[in-house]
Amino acid sequence: MNKRLNMGQLEYLITTGDLNTLNSLLAQNPALAQNSAGEDLSPLMLSCYYKRPDATSLLLKYLDKIDIFEAAAAGKFDILAYLVYTNPELVHEYNQDGFTPLALACYFGQYEAARYLIFKGADVNQLLSGDSGIRPIHLAVAGNHLDVVRMLIEHNVQINVQHHTGITPLHYAAKHGDPEMLITLLEEGADVAITMEDGLLPADLAREHGYAEIAEILSV
């Protein structure tokens, strides 16, 4: 029971960004940093998903070992490079959630990690496992990481790919309303006429999220 309480507290401290209390808890019980914080998600990965880089940095101080997926998500380039050096095939592996190391690096905006993985043979168009149809380009645009998107484009990423609900990278960009991202995708041939499963165009998403001018530009 005490362990479950500690893990619940750890998750709460990560998500709220209470670093002082988090540090105190880990100092008393460093093993907590290694344990799963529920649903097989490690505390380190949890801090990445909740976009708590300070918590990520703190947790790393208490970890003597992380896997390639955690290294990619957290941007720990030195560990990532070592793991790929010892086992080059890791760049193609999937974690239990269906993500490749490159997919995680793209989602969390870890440019150097993503670039290294591509250099080592990671496929920029590799689907996540399962039937989601999601690819690294979807994740990079969804995370609004323009530098990563441009790098993927340099490596011949497919722009008009749809995942299981019909969403393209341009749909994500329209939702965010970032002009630079939109221009980048459009210059690479992003198709404004592709509809989602429910018939929505990128222009419709832009309009729904308050980007009327962008919606006009995207209207066909």
Image (cartoon, rainbow, N blue to C red):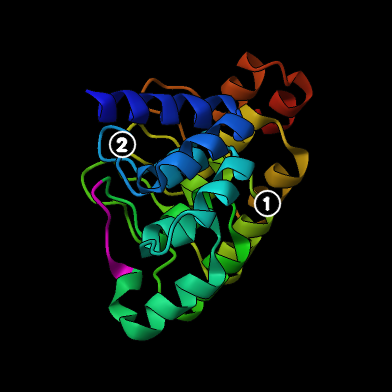
Q: Which residues are magenta?
A: 92-96
**Closer-to-camera residue (220/144):** 144
- Which image quadrant for residue 1? top left
Residue 13 vertical position relative to residue 185 in the rendered view, above or below? above
Residue underneath mark 1: 146
- Can residue 179 be seen here? The reply is yes
Spatial CA span between label 2 and label 1? 23 Å
Q: Furthest-bottom residue in view? A: 85
**Closer-to-camera residue (196/49):** 49
Q: Is residue 169 left or right of residue 20?
A: left
Residue 51 vertical position relative to residue 137 in the rendered view, above or below? above
Q: Is residue 165 left or right of residue 49?
A: left
Q: Residue flagged by tag 1: what amino acid is it?
A: Leu
Overall secondary structure of the magenta section:
loop
**Closer-to-camera residue (121/88):** 88
Find residue 62 and report its horizontal and vertical position in percent: 48, 54
Q: Which residue sits at x=61%, y=14%?
A: 208
The secondary structure type at the circle numbered 2 is: loop
Residue underneath mark 2: 164
The secondary structure type at the circle numbered 1 is: helix
Find residue 212 and report its horizontal and vertical position in percent: 74, 18
Name the mark nearer the viewer: 2 or 1. 1
**Closer-to-camera residue (190/22):** 22
Picture mark count: 2
Residue 141 vertical position relative to residue 11 in the rendered view, above or below? below
148 is within the stretch colored magenta: no
- Which image quadrant for residue 55? top right
